[in-house]
Amino acid sequence: MTKPGFVHAYVPVGASEAGMSHPVHRLETLSGKRIGFLGNGKPNADVLLETLAAELKKQSPIEMLHFRKQIPSLAAPDELIAEICDRCDAVVLAVGD
Amino acid sequence: MVTAMFADLAGSLLKERQEASLPVVRVAHPVGGISVTEARTRVTDDVVRGVASSLTGEGASSLAGTRERDGSAGADAGRILVEGDEADALEEFHRRGWTDGLPVVLPTEDRVEAALRSVSGTPLDPIGCLLPRNAAATLLDVAINAVMAGCRPEFMPVIVAAVEATQEADFNLYGVQTTTHNCGILVIVHGPISRTLGMNSGHNCLGNGNRANATIGRAVRLVLQNVGGATPGELDKATLGSPAKFTYCFAENEEQTPWRPFRTALGFGAEDSCVTVVAAEAPHNINDHGSSTAASLLNTVAQTMATVGNNNLYVGGDTYLILGPEHARTIADGGFSREGVQQVLYERARVATARISPGKLAELSSWGGYQNRLEEWKDGIPLVRTPGDIRVVVAGGSGKHSAWCPTFGATRSATRRIDRR
């Protein structure tokens, strides 16, 4: 392993999980679709998403479903994600501060 | 949708999680702390067009790119070859962002193997999946970072158990690693192993001067930064951070604890050695040289804790009180058990709603369950949700000081027995 004039060491970052990547499903049209909106629970996240939803509805006849996390610092629970998947054709998330 | 200041967090996360095709639309920062009217203006025509086209795949863009952290030239099968001497290699480690900013020990093969010999298991044994990077950490990864932190090989079992403890679901490693809050990872070592390793549980135990205290805490931080992906300013979005993010570790002073040791109170055995991880702020001093009674001293502690800006008050979780031995003795001599201390602090460490800004109260009221309890708590919001959430540990030397370590709030500490020896 040794090579004159070089130093060997271990890389400290390990390896990330492979095989997670998958293509994101896209809609052919927004018309008639049920779009979910999930905010992170921080102040005004609901304002941002409600404004966006209203603007999108002006453009296309969509059905809007709003969801929220209980506490911003906790990931959305699996049950909530499953509900969104069951009820919505697509979902818009808002992350910020 | 991501505010511009957090777009790099989203981009790094998507990159590390290999979700590169997930589209991201930026809005102007900030969204919080502005009026509703101004918040609405963040949704510009460009934002609406961006979201609409992302949903239908027309012109969608993503912030994600190719991974750079470990796939660069020179890195091969987990090793790096650097031209020059050890000093050149260490400069390369700094350049790649693999350090905490302070000099590290180069993780050479012989040093890492020595660390691995001090812990049971094989190098590729999984230790857990470290978020947010979703990295499958191995014993080898822990050993590499422990060497870098300056650990002696025999510290390894403590570090491994501490990293394993961060895997508890309620610890919320994902949130802890990426939050804007300034929490570090407080590592508390309990039981016989702390004495075997020569850890400091006495004077200045939260300060400098003891190799085990200093490097065990540093090793846990390096594992979470390097393997877990909490790179400062990228996935670690701490607004200010804290010195506690370099290292934050002490041993419980069981000899001067007037009650049962912390570990046996949790149900571990008398011979067990354990480690606790806490996503905590740096310690806040509690000075009381004047009180000679438990009631008076506990009032000082409670009033120190009853602050408006800490996360526990708003989010819950558990919080840590580190009693100096002299304070602990005064309180115990007053007839208080550990549970009695928890109860009285739960009752007295409260914040009147009038001390909290209307905007902050409104934010809290939007969170589940909080609004309903404001009526119940009209005389004061408790620091945490149950008395048992005020954890009490004794540490330190002589003197009339104690410390309170508020936590991230959306987290609960985790204690593990140290088994891998």
Image (spheres, rainbow, N blue to C red):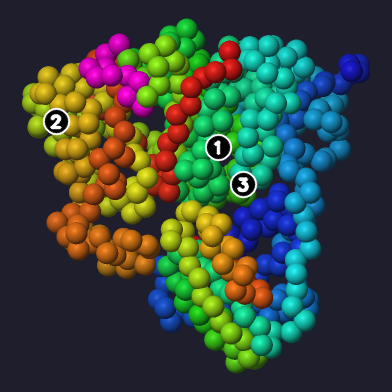
Say the numbered circle drawn on residue B132. 3
Q: CA distance from mark 3 to mark 1?
A: 12 Å
Q: Residue B191 placed where, x, y %?
A: 41, 15
Residue drawn at (19%, 59%) of the image = B376
Residue B331 drawn above or below residue B97: above
Instruction: Name the residue type under label 1.
Output: Gln
Instruction: Name the residue type under label 2.
Output: Leu
The residue to which callout 1 is attached is: B167
Q: Nearer the viewer, residue B391 or B152?
A: B391
Q: Which residues are magenta?
A: B255-266
**Is label 3 or label 2 in front?**
3
Which element carries disc 3, helix, strand or loop? loop
Residue B114 drawn above or below residue B163: above
| Discs 3, 2 touching: Cβ within 8 Å | no
Which element carries disc 1, helix, strand or loop? loop
Confirm whether the magenta stretch covers residue B324: no
The residue to which callout 2 is attached is: B297
Q: CA distance from mark 2 to mark 1?
A: 36 Å
Instruction: Name the residue type under label 3.
Output: Pro
